[in-house]
């Protein structure tokens, strides 16, 4: 959040309101038959039937579940509304348009509507005085049959080369260095993407961008690097790491300020000879989060112990 990364760049990620609006659904998308060439947003026969029965089922819901039912139904409707062009994506702040594709909100719709559909299914099932097993069997068969028919379409696709994918993965595992086109670039510094050719051809070592300095005995291993710098004169060094917060750079044991170079790499200014060390120590936010998680775990264990002791004392009585 404090850096300039691709994921927050609306031009790179196409996360402005206009592009989110273009990636919305029409009402017909919810009732189309599935094809293997497009994304499928269809409700399907089972869910469509259960939703149609909502007015009938609502009257028969137990009072203690009705409030939850209404909340889930409202949230499902809101999520579904946000997947359509009727939602004013054009005026939404980037904190919302960062979703990139409005249809991703189907995930929320599915979560909320599952509860509603489940309650409806139970009420319908309970309404049958006789032949409950027949009704249940029909629903299960419908789900498996319709799902099977949908999946069967993918079995006929012959363009997918599984062996080629496996070999590609093995090659990546053996590689000593990965190129920028072999990774997810969404979380890279924006400057690195803008200078991607530089990134692709850059050697895995420290560069002197300005001033002068001799780099000797550089030993880089994963997120740690150590080197000797000699004959230093107002030197700007670009270290062999993409710029992320959490790196600590020391010169002769003293912490020095680091910043982002024009190429999106970790950079420092030095003006004395000595030993330069780089290591990833994490951000303050990371450390606080880990501390909270640890305290939470300890509290959870303590609460469980107290809970069990109370149970044992009740049994003893």
Image (cartoon, rainbow, N blue to C red):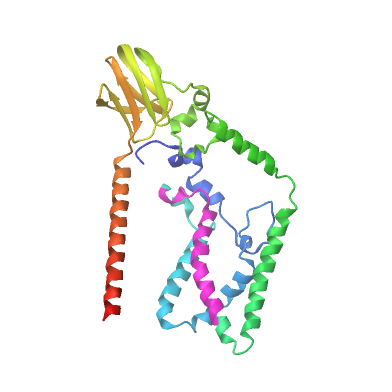
Image: magenta residue range = 95-123
**Residue pictured at 48% horizontal, 70% vertical:** 73
Q: In this picture, is 12 found above or below 306?
A: above
Residue at 25% x, 24% y is: 253
The structure residue drawn at horizontal position 44% and vertical position 83%, both measured from the top left corner, is 62
Residue furthest bottom in the image: 129
Determine if the magenta segment contains residue 121: yes
Dividing the image into 4 quarters, which one contains the C terminus? bottom left
Q: State the image quarter where residue 260 is shown.
A: top left
Q: Outermost residue, left direction?
A: 254
Is residue 253 covered in magenta? no
Q: Quadrant of residue 173?
A: top right
Magenta stretch, main secondary structure class: helix
Q: Is residue 204 left or right of residue 181?
A: left
Is 38 or 155 nearer to us in this picture?
155
Q: Nearer the viewer, residue 293 or 116?
A: 293
Q: Is residue 87 left or right of residue 282?
A: right
Nearer-the-camera pick, 209 or 223? 223
Q: Is residue 292 left or right of residue 89?
A: left
Name the spot of residue 270 as percent of width and height, x first: 29, 18
Above or below, 173 relative to 22: above
Image vertical order of residue 292 relative to residue 6, above or below: below
Compared to residue 143, the image places residue 126 above or below, namely: below
Position in image of residue 219 (x %, y %): 40, 22
> Would you say residue 240 is visible in this rendering?
no
Residue furthest out toward the front: 316
Judged left or right of residue 284, residue 33 is right
**Residue at x 43%, y 51% (from the top left corner):** 96
Report the quarter where the N terminus lies: top left
């Amino acid at each position: 959040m404090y850096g300039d990364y691709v994921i927050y760049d609306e031009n790179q990620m196409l996360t402005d309101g206009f592009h989110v609006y273009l990636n919305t659904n029409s009402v017909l998308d919810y009732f189309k038959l599935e094809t293997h060439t497009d994304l499928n947003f269809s409700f399907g026969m089972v869910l469509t039937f259960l939703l149609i029965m909502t007015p009938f089922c609502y009257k028969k819901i137990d009072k203690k579940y009705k409030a939850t039912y209404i909340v889930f139904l409202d949230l499902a409707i809101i999520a579904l509304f946000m997947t359509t062009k009727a939602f004013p994506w054009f005026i939404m702040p980037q904190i919302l348009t960062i979703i990139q594709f409005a249809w991703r909100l189907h995930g929320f719709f599915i979560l909320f509507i599952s509860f509603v559909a489940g309650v409806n299914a139970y009420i319908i099932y309970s309404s049958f005085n006789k032949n409950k097993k027949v009704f249940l069997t029909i629903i299960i068969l419908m789900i498996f049959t319709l799902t099977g028919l949908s999946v069967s379409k993918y079995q006929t696709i012959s363009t997918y080369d599984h062996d080629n994918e496996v070999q590609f993965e093995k090659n990546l595992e053996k590689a000593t260095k990965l190129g920028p086109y072999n990774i997810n670039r969404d979380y890279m510094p924006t400057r690195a993407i803008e200078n991607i050719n530089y990134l692709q051809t850059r050697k895995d070592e420290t560069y002197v961008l300005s001033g002068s300095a001799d780099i000797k005995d550089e030993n880089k291993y994963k997120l740690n690097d150590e080197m000797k710098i000699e004959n230093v004169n107002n030197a700007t060094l670009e270290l062999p790491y993409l710029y992320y917060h959490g790196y600590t750079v020391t010169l002769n044991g003293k912490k020095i300020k680091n910043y982002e170079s024009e190429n999106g790499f970790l950079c420092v200014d030095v003006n004395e000879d000595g030993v330069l060390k780089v290591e990833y120590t994490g951000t303050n936010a990371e450390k606080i989060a880990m501390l909270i998680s640890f305290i939470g775990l300890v509290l959870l264990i303590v609460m469980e112990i107290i809970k069990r002791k109370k149970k044992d004392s009740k049994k003893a009585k």
